[in-house]
Image (cartoon, rainbow, N blue to C red):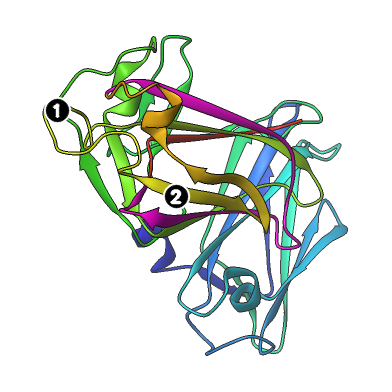
Amino acid sequence: DPDIFRSGREGQFIYEIPLNPGIYELRLYFAETGVTGEGIRSVGLFINGLPVSTLDVASDAGGANTATVKIFKDISPAKDGLLHLAFQGAGPAGFVNALEILPGTAGKMLPVRLTMQDSPYRDHLGQIWMPDQYFLSGRKTTGKSPIEGTADPALYSTHRFGNFTYAIPVVEGGRYTVTLHFAETWFTPPESLGGVGSRIFDVYCNGRTLLKDFDILKETGGMGNHAVVKVFHNISASAQGKLNLTFVPTKNYALVSAIEVTEE
């Protein structure tokens, strides 16, 4: 949502947020719009008086005017019942565009579940999948036929296709399981020309090859409109706390229907 990055608080400032006792996940949202590039401004963050991060927002995001999200797990209020967040700046003043506090799980980042749809989706297990975000490039399209081989056909009805990347924020230093969901709804005989070999692409994450010469129809024995799930374990976060998923076409466009990230 670009609107949350159009304003922010700037300077040397403190938030004192009342919380019930418990474990929380803190998400901080930034976009550097005040300087032109890396090495000009660093934002120092203190949680309950302890330094936890020094962030060059432009460097972390890959440039100015680009959003980035920092996630901190296992956050609890201080003894006074307040979460104390202090922001300081080196160079220009510190800043933040938005912050979010969610009930957390001890020792684990909350799962990230993305659907290519425009609104949240609740699956058959009651899990919520958030609308498509964290992407760069690509387009969305929606298939017309029902999807088989899944208890959640609606999850596969919309796709992002093209040559595109996701920069999914995670907790730095963690290892993650990445689950990718696919369904071929275009090169699906007899409705469309094509078949096995019509769409081939690669998928990478932080330089690691996840899928090479991947053909969705080959996975299903030529059956179109059929769910395919691929699971990858022990994926390391980048130094910036991101899972950079890159979808690279070899023949026609790359495609994905949904993405799930869980901490191991």
Q: Secondary structure at mark 1?
A: loop
Q: Is residue 204 visible?
A: yes
Magenta stretch, main secondary structure, is: strand
Q: Nearer the viewer, residue 111 or 231?
A: 231
The location of residue 92, given as percent across then percent down, is: 64, 87
Residue found 55% across the figure and 29% down from its top: 230
Q: Which residue is mark 1?
A: 144
Q: Which residues are magenta?
A: 225-254
Q: Is residue 113 visible?
A: no
**Position of 194 compared to 238: left or right?**
left
Label 2 vs label 1: CA separation?
23 Å
* Amino acid type, mark 1: Lys
* Amino acid type, mark 2: Phe
> Relative to residue 181, is residue 43 depicted above or below?
below
Q: Residue 201: which disc? A: 2
Dot 2 or dot 1, earlier in sequence? 1
**Position of 175 compared to 247: left or right?**
right
The location of residue 189, given as percent across then percent down, is: 18, 27
Q: Quadrant of residue 85?
A: bottom right
Residue found 57% across the figure and 87% down from its top: 37
